[in-house]
Amino acid sequence: MITITPLQRQRSPENPFCSLSQRYLRIKSKMAAPMVCNHRGHFLKILHLLHGRPPFSRAFCDSFIAKSVKDLIGVVENVGKDFEAKAWIRGLRQHKGVTFLDVNDGSCAQDLQVVVKPQTVHNNSEFTFGGAIEVKGQIVKSQSKGQPIELLASSIHVTGACEAEAYPFKAKVRHPLKYTRQYPHLRSRTPINGALMRVRSSATLAVHNFFQDEGYVNVHTPVLTSSDCEGGGNLFRVQPSDDEKDDDDHFFGTPVYLLVSGQLQLETIACSHTKAYTFGPTFRAENSRTRRHLAEFYMVEGEIAFTKSLQDVTEVMEQFVKSVASAVYTKCSEDVQFISERTMEGTRNMWGIDLHSEHETFLVHHCGNIPVFVVDYPKDIKPFYARQNGDDKTAAAVDLLVPRIGELIGGSLREERLDVLQRRIQHSGLQDDYQWYLDLRRFGTVPHGGFGLGFERLLQFLLGVDHIRDVIPFPRFPGSCLL
Amino acid sequence: MITITPLQRQRSPENPFCSLSQRYLRIKSKMAAPMVCNHRGHFLKILHLLHGRPPFSRAFCDSFIAKSVKDLIGVVENVGKDFEAKAWIRGLRQHKGVTFLDVNDGSCAQDLQVVVKPQTVHNNSEFTFGGAIEVKGQIVKSQSKGQPIELLASSIHVTGACEAEAYPFKAKVRHPLKYTRQYPHLRSRTPINGALMRVRSSATLAVHNFFQDEGYVNVHTPVLTSSDCEGGGNLFRVQPSDDEKDDDDHFFGTPVYLLVSGQLQLETIACSHTKAYTFGPTFRAENSRTRRHLAEFYMVEGEIAFTKSLQDVTEVMEQFVKSVASAVYTKCSEDVQFISERTMEGTRNMWGIDLHSEHETFLVHHCGNIPVFVVDYPKDIKPFYARQNGDDKTAAAVDLLVPRIGELIGGSLREERLDVLQRRIQHSGLQDDYQWYLDLRRFGTVPHGGFGLGFERLLQFLLGVDHIRDVIPFPRFPGSCLL
């Protein structure tokens, strides 16, 4: 039996996996690798994972995956070096005696210009807008404006041409975001959607980094739930596809829905780990087809035990937004710049969706078009878990309203007093479903609070993107679930 | 209108948000803050987010959230400092003239010992196992063995006692993991489940760090899908809870299921960004109640364009496992040590579940109980997208088998040849559903490959945890969907 024990700390920086391998291998006998065995008449080659192989180094890994255009572009010091670009053609210009290709590998907004001399290639017609190529050559100083370097091709292999007639994107055309939405399997190839993908990815890491740096434990709150966070409707019901219609609770033994919010589950962990966060998909079966609603969207939720004032919660909310904004604007500055230029082209003046939204808009305007916190809402319009203030009228709840978006984050202190919470739950008629939630107050209750925000709305706010369907790779909304 | 533009890089380390604030505020007029307005007869206080407030500093943030026990424990240099612990009581010993409390705030496996003299507290009976306290005092050198420091209490406030009779956990009892599973809302308070939460959280960040460091773009593949990755059954069907039973496709206009694998969606992004990964929940409506199956589990999937050999894919798989293992064993060494000691107590010899599992077990045993890669499977037992080898018999597919778990990761080269893929899809009778997938080959196809693994099985493997329900906070399986 293999023994897996913690790494000791004497690993050397040069060989970080050495101790790990030794530990893995501590008990096993020495074997030759690779070896071969025959099973069920089929030929199976068996390679050993952690035996007889050198530990990985960066160089070993890089030997088969091309260094990306991002690492290369704009750095004059790379002149004279060999490079192999593996990328898609975004631009194509034939001149007498030379062909220019603008290629992009998705690692950054910038294209790499490839210079192809006639002797390098037999048939220029193989180059197609949208086609994929592998091109080896040397980095040279660019003769053109707009980029310091370019790649002088010595050999080119077209891995896949592109059927121009059928391809929905055309060379030199700036397709509107709305147009590209029809092609969720292809739109990430357009410059604007490609940039949005990278920003979303960086923002995702920034969310995790903020919370983990602050000592929060990550919790994968479940997608499938038998609890209904706010006691409201708009739920998606889940059942096995082969279920009999009249017996649709048999799989889990209880009706199961898609998660609306992970807050209540997150509170259970905050009540043991003090600080907890979750970041994952949540669902609304609302018939809303607006520029800020989705049926499936990502929520970020944080929960903090031993927190007594709403001000404490708003501090964390503010710090969170600033931290993610700072990370995104720093790490993806070219992409953000590019997106901003595009999204600011057409100004839009249509504000808000309904009365509530108009109200938010009014407040943001009133305060000078900056983000504002609204605190201490009337208790009756807030869910049962929001902590009542001493005035018996309001709850310690807060929303952060931002320009163009309206509500970005909602937070509250949670009712930690068992008797008050019991009354609120009874008042809502939910006493049968939330005994487990009351248990958190029964066994070592603590004052606590937290907040939740829609990740897509944060991206809209940070990037000035008008429609929510452009900041999520596969948008789901009434009437549409493509792919 | 507010203008949001990328941060310039002259931010100073002391004041990382300064430029950001200035940018946000560039256009707006100066306002007094905080301000008050009256809306709908309710009193609303309005605070400004990014105006008239000092930028956050770490100290500002720490002023309201207690420094954690983790930062404190085991560091003799903290002797003489003031500290406020906010934590739950895990141990309680009354001696004449002094009470010892072991308290834990979830930040680490270790408890902090609190020494309470009679003059500090009026009524010792307020201290209960599982209760929550806030205790101020001074760090002193510990008189006891087992810890270098302890907290000498000067004031104590019990925020919540614990009803001992009803509380399912008892002092000085080591509850089996199986017992704690009955209480998903409380079990994270036990030492072993608390440690598992922290390790899962660290492993989550390690997954993101591995891919992001290697230049992969994160993709939130959708939970709701109209595609069925492998053409198989075991799907969960989704519909709004208020739907009429006989018209259950009206919401999305198409039957919608929960995601089985994000691979095909991920391929669309790899075909624009070269390297892409996803990490999120996936679902199986299988009636499997084994120690390695869940109805909802987390998958990590990576996809790499311009990859031509299966060996390239296995290199990344190996590097991934080593990277996460290294991060977890380094960052959570105490927790891993603690878990290992507990999980190794009862040895278990039951291996595998079915024939396939027995087969995997055989191979792992045969190779000396180390992880093994099995490559080049018969093509007919692999899905349509696995790339055919030249022998016309096998596919370029690989599984990584590990001791105790069986299959940990599966990978393959993907069929990038349009004509071959078309035949395979037609053979499977799926031609109507996968035109979008064929488009990826029609428009600039590239050789590519990738892999996917169950995150919970990775945790089981790394930690030696026998049952999968212990490495996920809210396990879902046939007959159970608690909370």
Image (cartoon, coloured by chain):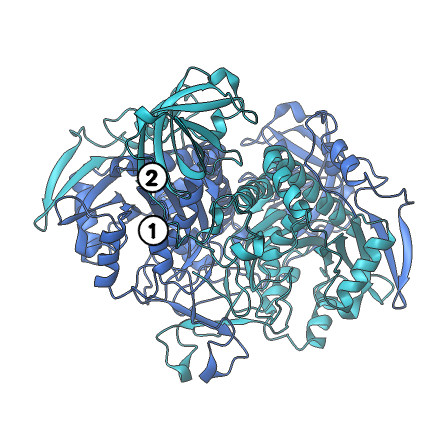
Chain colours: A blue, B cyan
**Residue, disc 2:** B125
Up/down of B2 relative to B477, above or below: above
Residue B54 is situated, as x and y percent measured from the top left of the image, at: 28, 24
Write down the quadrant of residue B214 in the picture: top right
In the picture, the quarter occupied by the C terminus of chain B is: bottom left
Label 1 Cα crowd, 10 Å radius (few <14 / some 14-19 / many 20+) = many
- Badge 1 and badge 2 both on one subunit: no
Label 2 Cα crowd, 10 Å radius (few <14 / some 14-19 / many 20+) = few
The kind of residue tagged 2 is Ser
Chain of the residue displaying label 2: B
Residue B270 is situated, as x and y percent measured from the top left of the image, at: 61, 51
Label 1, label 2: how far apart the Cα atoms are:
17 Å
The kind of residue tagged 1 is Arg
Q: Horizontal placement of B55 versus B465: left or right?
A: left
Residue B189 appears in the figure: yes
Residue B160 is situated, as x and y percent measured from the top left of the image, at: 32, 43
Please identify, in this view, whether the residue under mark 1 or under mark 2 is nearer the observer: 2
Up/down of B88 relative to B394, above or below: above
Disc on res. A162 = none
**Residue lying at 82% horizontally and 35% vertically, measured from the top left:** A54
**Residue lying at 64% horizontally and 58% vertically, measured from the top left:** A162
**Residue lying at 42% horizontally and 37% vertically, measured from the top left:** A324
Up/down of B330 relative to B75, above or below: below
Depth check, front residue: B184 or A19:
B184
Q: How many marks?
A: 2
Write down the quadrant of residue A305 in the picture: top left
Mark 2 lies on a secondary structure that is helix
**Residue lying at 74% horizontally and 68% vertically, measured from the top left:** B354
Residue B266 is situated, as x and y percent measured from the top left of the image, at: 59, 55
Disc on res. A442 = 1
Depth check, front residue: A321 or A280:
A280
Residue A196 appears in the figure: no
